[in-house]
Structures are given as C-alpha cells and as structure tokens.
C-alpha cells in the first residue's frame, strides 16, 4: 500500500511555476467489482403478441402433424411449424400487425387443407384460432338402368343429400351415367338418392334409396326404371251393337199393313162385318207412336222395342186382312146358292 501511494503522490501539475500534488489514484478503488463486469440481458418487448392454433376435422377429432406457414404483411415468412399430438401449434414473439396463415399439409390422407386466412396480432395478447380441415369428398357414379334388360338410360335426374339437405343433383348423359363429388362429414356418411325426372318412355322411380360413402372413396349409385305401359286398346264388345237409325217409320205406312194393304170391295157388297173389320184394323195401325221429326236417333237397346212393336203390328194387320178376305169371299157366294133354291 505504501509503494502505491508513493507512485500516486509523484504525480504533480505545474501551476504558476510551482508543483502541486494531485492525489488522483487515491480517488478510485484499485480492484473492479463483479457487478461492473456483467452485461445485463435485454428485456422482452412489451408489445409482442402470439398466434395459437388448434386443428381438428368436421367430426371434432384433433389432427396432429398439420403443417402451417405464417407470412407477415410484406409476404415474408414469420414462422412455420406442425401441430403436436394434441393438434396445437404456437407462433410466439410476433410484432403487432396483420399476418397470412397458410396450411400446407393436413397430415392425414383423408382430409383436405383449410383455406388461407388473415390473422390480426395485437400487442401483448395471444390470438387463438381453431382450424377445421374438411374430409376429402367422395366420388359418386350414377347409373340409370332398365329394370328388365339392364340397358343404361339417358335423361334420368336425381337428387342426392343427407337429412333434409340436397347436396348434389345429377342427370345421366348419352351413356346413361353421370358423376360428381359428394361432400362427407365423417368416415361413414349416410346419404339418400331420389329420382325427380324419369328417362323418356319410363315411369318415375318413386322410392328413396340409401347408401353410405367415405372420404375420398368412390361409390356407385343405381336407379332402375320401368317402361311406361301402353294405353289399352278399346274392347270391340264395348261398341254399340246397333247403328243409330233415324225416326222409325210407322208400320201403317208399309204396304199390306192396316187398311192400306186391303183391297176395296165391290160397290154394294159391303156388309156390317166387313165394315167392322175395316174399323177394327184402323186402331192397330195407329197404336204405334210415331216419333216427331227431328228427334234424336236411338241406338242399341232403345231400337229393340220399336222393332218388336213393328213386327207385332205387321202380324196383327195380316190377320185382319186375312179375315176380311175370307168374309168377302163368303159374301160373294151367297147369291148363287139362292138362285139354285128358287
């Protein structure tokens, strides 16, 4: 300690031609402390934020191994990573701003990646997101067939759906088939199919069919149609047996009926019986009613009473005429008998 003091005291400054001692060394400690040599760590930024991701599918199951890429507003990579066994991933220490989140792989052969989305990072807060990866769509092949010969039929239109929702509408083309993608919500989704338009010349297939489809799996759906029955031909027995005829003529107008067919007796030879027979014949001819002109034609069973009545009139008129002729002949023979007697 003494030697050090001597060296320190030897330092002097010349002031106005005299020496003045300056005890400089005695003002500072001779050995540095530990706190002076340590370099303090930088504190974290108070305005940094983070993004926390949870990934699952439409059935609610978590998806490990899903890969994500985070881009800043300038399009530069701000972070990347994969979800853990619980389907979680965190991007820490992010400056506040708007970022673009992209899923590059779902980590499952049965799932599609989710669509890109913007993420807003706020100072000192964690932005939590739930990413839902959809199942891959099932591929549906529709066939419309003849129910008897199995021929593929074009022009059949069907709706396919689940529950009360219609998800897909297909119409078979020239080859009798149609295809499309059907979204599924789990590993075995149950669907219904209903035909809403039948092929030309076929009846509509009215029942609803059910089938099951899985993600990314092909499935074939077939509807069968029956040919439309031809209209039955009319039965010949249903046709009227008699053709319509006009107003029937009165039997009295025909020759030989009533008084029209009777020959006039010679003058002076009429007898009361002959007159009576002539008078009796008149009502017979008049008993058949004559329909008025312009009346509607009668067909079928309506003409039968007229024909029967006409035949009866003809028979009656013939009988009356025969009686009149016989009486006339007997009247003519009486004078010859009286002459022989005298």
Image (tube, rainbow, N blue to C red):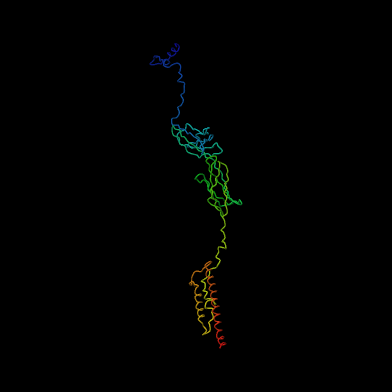
Q: Residue furthest left?
A: 16
Residue 35 sits above or below residue 239 on the image: above
Disc tally is 0
Image coordinates of residue 84 in percent, x first then y, are 52, 32
Residue 40 sits above or below residue 327 on the image: above
In the picture, the quarter occupied by the N terminus is top left
Q: Residue furthest front?
A: 341
120 sits to left or right of 204: left
In the picture, the quarter occupied by the C terminus is bottom right
Residue 152 sits above or below residue 69 on the image: below
258 vs 27, nearest the viewer? 258
Image coordinates of residue 191 in percent, x first then y, are 53, 44
116 vs 38, nearest the viewer? 116
Q: Residue furthest bottom?
A: 342
326 vs 128, nearest the viewer? 326
Residue 191 sits above or below residue 1 on the image: below
143 vs 148, nearest the viewer? 148
| Residue 26 found in image quarter | top left
Image coordinates of residue 22 in percent, x first then y, are 40, 15
Q: Residue furthest right?
A: 149
338 sits to left or right of 28: right
Image coordinates of residue 132 in percent, x first then y, are 50, 38
């Amino acid at each position: 300690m003494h030697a050090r003091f001597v060296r320190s005291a030897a330092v002097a400054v010349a002031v106005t031609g005299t020496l003045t001692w300056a005890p400089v060394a005695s003002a500072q400690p001779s050995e540095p402390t530990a706190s002076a040599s340590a370099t303090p760590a930088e504190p974290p930024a108070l305005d940094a934020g983070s993004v926390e991701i949870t990934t699952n599918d439409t059935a609610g199951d978590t998806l490990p191994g899903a890969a994500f890429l985070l881009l800043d507003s300038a399009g530069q990579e701000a972070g990347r990573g994969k979800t853990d066994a619980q389907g979680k991933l965190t991007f820490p220490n992010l400056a506040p701003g708007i970022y673009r989140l992209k899923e590059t792989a779902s980590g499952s052969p049965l799932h599609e990646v989710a669509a890109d989305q913007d993420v807003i990072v706020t100072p000192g807060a964690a932005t939590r997101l739930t990413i839902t990866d959809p199942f891959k769509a099932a591929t549906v092949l529709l066939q419309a067939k003849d129910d008897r010969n199995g021929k593929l039929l074009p022009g059949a239109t069907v709706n396919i759906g689940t529950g009360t929702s219609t998800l897909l509408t297909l119409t078979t083309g020239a080859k009798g088939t149609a295809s499309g993608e059907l979204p599924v919500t789990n590993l075995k989704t149950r669907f219904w199919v209903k035909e809403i338009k039948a092929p030309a010349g076929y009846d509509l297939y009215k029942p609803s069919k059910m089938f099951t489809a899985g993600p990314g799996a092909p499935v074939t759906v077939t509807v069968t149609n029956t040919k439309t029955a031809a209209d039955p031909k009319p039965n010949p027995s249903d046709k009227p047996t008699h053709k319509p005829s006009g107003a029937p003529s009165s039997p009295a107008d025909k020759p030989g009926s009533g008084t029209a067919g009777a020959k006039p007796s010679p003058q002076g030879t009429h007898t009361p019986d002959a007159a009576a027979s002539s008078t009796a014949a008149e009502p017979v001819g008049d008993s058949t009613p004559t329909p008025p002109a312009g009346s509607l034609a009668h067909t079928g069973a309506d003409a039968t009473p007229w024909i029967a009545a006409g035949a009866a009139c003809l028979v009656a008129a013939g009988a009356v005429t025969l009686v009149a002729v016989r009486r006339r002949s007997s009247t003519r023979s009486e004078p010859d008998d009286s002459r022989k007697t005298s």
